[in-house]
Image: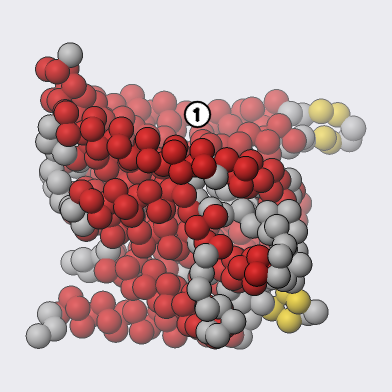
Amino acid sequence: MFSKKNILTSLLFLFFTLIIYFLITKQVIYPTILPMTVKGVVNLFSDWSVTINANICLEKGYDVYLDNPCDPWNRKHIYGHILLYLPYIKDFQNFYFIYLPLTLNLAFLYSIIRFFNFEDKIEYFCLFFIALSTPVILVIERANMDIAIFLLIILIAKNKNNVVNHITLVLTTILKFYPISMAVIFLFKNNFKTMLINTLIFLITVFLILFLQWESLIKIFNNSSQYSDSKIFMGIYTFSFIGAFNFFNNFEIIINNKNYNFIKYLYLSLVLFLPIIVTYYKNFRVVFYNNSISNLFLKNDFNNRVYILSSIVILFCYFSFTSFIYREIFLIGLIPWLIQNRKLIENKFINIYFYVLTFKFLISTLCTFFVVNKIFPSLNPVIIFSKHCLDFYLISLIFLVFLSAVTSVYKKYFIKNI
């Protein structure tokens, strides 16, 4: 028998599915979402199709890490070798090119909606901003592989079987390298020795596989330049510290042939550094003595697990890679825990954190719309700069909470075992 929440979730899922279908088919999302076109025709699921095309070219004898002419844009393969073993592609092309990415997209959208409790009206507004945000629409339109990683995070968070999680984590890591950070899931074990053994087994297994595929790994890192060299990675479509830093360095304020770069340093201080300093000053002690945060690793439930997995992936990707904004979808994994804890009396910080996260999706979408559509072209650098500042501010909150949670684990399990 369906519960009230299940019925509501299903109705909202249908509602947002129809809206997104309309936005894409009527091409309302373009050019805010940069289209991938072939002879003037928009190509849907383009990030997904590159992998399928790589499999086709591999059967023809091409080294797809060096050349992939089966892809309309000749994009080289940048994922793990495991994705080059997809069977029967020629016999089931509709399944691989259409139905499989469509299924993943629908599962992704449904998962987002399931994260909300809908106990007050504000959650409906928050869901609206998130489900129709630029990162979500982009990742669905492209059917990017990060959707599969997002769904695997949910699977790992729900499942507590050690063997299944080991297998899932290993497969996910050799698919795209950054999920190696999700080995943090083993910190949920209530025993220091078990934590250590599980982590070592996972790392040894992964590095052994990567060592056996070393030649392919080198090619993957060489191919990353086909994306990271693009100027767009210093602009509105960037979600990374490297991208933000590069943009800041290249952003110059010249008026009447005079350098006014001191203005950008002043703006950075007022918009980013001052808010971080004030937030840390007022909340640092509160965060480190907050029961909800200290129990993030110690209470082994779904909301805590999906929060930790999502936050470590976000931090790892933000500081390690030059990433497209579709990596922002991992921020959605923070939602269940934030909703669960934001209304508790002692959790004013978490409530603020929740609104900053939601506000970030709204602002990112508006900033992308203004910049790509050239609504205020003269202000584009300021808009992009502001978006990067908001990104970093949110990352600072995620880092603070994660640091507090790890500190609690260290105090409980590691100190007494030293």
Q: How is the image coloured?
A: secondary structure
Q: For residue 284, say whether it is visible.
A: yes
Asked if 292 appears above or below 48 in the picture, the reply is above
Quarter of the picture holding the C terminus:
top left
Residue shown at 29% from the left, 48% from the top? 166
Q: Tell me if 133 is positioned left or right of 301 in this view.
A: right
Q: Tell me if 347 is positioned left or right of 362 in this view.
A: left
Q: Position of residue 344 (x, y in %)?
A: 14, 47
Q: Position of residue 13 (x, y in %)?
A: 34, 79
Label 1 SS: helix
Q: Amino acid at mark 1?
A: Phe
Q: Tell me if 234 is positioned left or right of 328 in this view.
A: right
Residue shown at 21% from the left, 57% from the top? 159
Q: Position of residue 94 (x, y in %)?
A: 54, 85
Residue shown at 75% from the left, 59% from the top? 67
According to the picture, the residue beneath numbered tag 1 turns out to be 273
Q: For residue 322, say whether it is visible.
A: no
